[in-house]
Amino acid sequence: MKVEKSIILFFILFSFCLVAFAPLPNNNSNYNAAIVLKVIQDVKHKKPQTSWLTTKPSTQLETNDQLRTGEKSVAVVRFVDGSSLRVREKTIITIFADKRERGLIKNTKIDVGKMRFDVEKQQDDDEFIITTPTAVATIRGTSGLVNVLEDGQTILTVETGIVDVKALFGTQQSTSVEAGRTSIINRDGNISVNQANEQQLNEVRNSLKSNEKFIRVITPQGTFRVYYLDFE
Amino acid sequence: MKLVKSLLVILFLLSEINAQPSIRLVVFPELNTTDFAAFATVNDLQGAPRIFCAEINAPGQNVVMAGQVEWKKIGWNNFVEIAWFITKPFLARNLCNDDIGRVDVRIQDHRSNSNLIDENLQLGKPTGEYRLTVYLYDETGQNLLASDSKNLVFLNPAQTITIINPRSNQSYDAGNILVEWTPISGVSDYSIKVSERTDPNQSLEDALNRGTPLVNNRSVGNSTSVNLRDILERELRPGSEVVLQVSANIPGPAGGKKIFSEIINFSIINPESQYYQQLVQRFNNALRLLGDNELSRLFGDGQIDLSRVQIRREDGTIMTLEELINFLELNANNIIRVTKE
């Protein structure tokens, strides 16, 4: 019985690895996949072999590079095709890009946190993929927000367009999520799709806020600036 | 074959039509908001803002361009020339007013009516009707090839003063009321009138003109802001409602004229009131949500007197304390840090 369980576990892990990393690049060449357009507060990036470096605007991200945002921090990343990601606070992503003969595959792996995507319409052979610990989402000319909870559960709210989602576990269910709907993909591989509620829609709208502004509070003890995020 | 011949004839005719020199005047819509001072320097166009362009179609030809600006003052029947210029010959190309006087397009001659220009400058902005005409001549400057003209009508809407701050129906601390208003042209000075409105049923106009004013048509020069505290003739009462009007004095014949703003009303915060105490509590709660920072600490320790705090947005506009608190409450998740300048 123990051996059986181990074999099952092995196959689950093996199939997970196959599915999760199937769209990722075959080569590890230093392909400039994206550029960091904006950095607010604490944003760091690293290559597979290096330690975390402070990210500055116009930092180039190559395939396999990781980017992470600290508390109350935001990074705006743009891909060569004009698609952009707004990486919200306390989020870790890994960028992959694979220039194949017939198209460009962009895959962003999000381990935890929230990320808004505004994806330009993809050419026939191009793909824009977001991979989370529990799902793979294929996006073509779509905007929305993906939220990966600490336990790996994925909450995907689509603002415009359609996103195809496939669970990585269980029966590997797949479905399409239309604009105005939210999909939850749990660790068992179950996918539920419902009408997005007001809070979820607000969260998607708010995820566009990546413009730093301030209010000045002038007191006899000095002048303070209250910085906040606003729409671009 | 017949068809081919016909097509060739049509193509030939079209090319002949295209070969006719032409000039088309393009006036930028921004001219409506352009200060006339820039427009009136047409006799020396170098350095002027781009207000018009001429699309010249005379391929490969040397041409001369002339331009004329005429003005029909409000109440006049005819246009009068303000300025005129003519260039030296240049190879035909599209050009704009700010190209004239540069390398390949030099001014041959120009004239202007300095009295009319001065009159326009005094008006401060385009007023009445203007006609811009461009003429395209051959390189001798004698034979007119084409011309185009555009009329620009400025309706000269009545000038108004808008009070930017304080805002109607808001509450302000007595010590921190900055009165700000929009400027208008041709003003010698602005005056402020402030009174207390003792009866909520009283009209704002009645309130302004009845009783002893707090500020009685006090001139503040041509500045467009003043701290109310600096011009008060008597103290503002905490909890009272106040009405305020700004007027502009414009000198001119027969004593000039006065332009008045709308009358606005606002309240003076009473630090003893429950409303104020609630604001203090809400501000304290809102600051707590922002995490540890010096502003929160100072306020928490009672070192900051809210009645002496001024709040400004990034663009310099004023926020009331209540507006700031509402903002912090609604946007707690979007506040990223608080720093001291």
Image: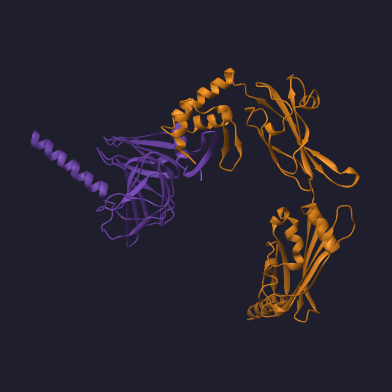
Residue A123 in the figure: left or right of residue A6: right
Is residue A162 placed above or below B52 in the rendered structure? above
Q: Residue at x 27, y 35 (%)?
A: A187
Colour purple maps to chain: A
Residue B198 in the figure: left or right of residue A20: right
Q: How many marks?
A: 0
Is residue A35 placed above or below B179 in the rendered structure? below
Q: Where in the figure is residue B129, as x and y percent of width and height?
A: 82, 56
Q: Quadrant of residue B312?
A: top right
Q: Where in the figure is residue B124, as x and y percent of width and height?
A: 77, 52
Is residue B75 placed above or below B92 in the rendered structure? above
Q: Where in the figure is residue B125, as x and y percent of width and height?
A: 76, 53
The way the protein has been coloured in the rendering is by chain
Q: Nearer the viewer, residue A44 or B248?
A: B248
Q: Quadrant of residue B215?
A: top right
Q: Where in the figure is residue A31, as x and y percent of width and height?
A: 32, 60
Residue B285 visible in rendering = no
Q: Quadrant of residue A124?
A: bottom left
Chain B drawn in what color?
orange
Q: Residue at x 43, y 37 (%)?
A: A181
Q: Nearer the viewer, residue A76 or A212?
A: A212
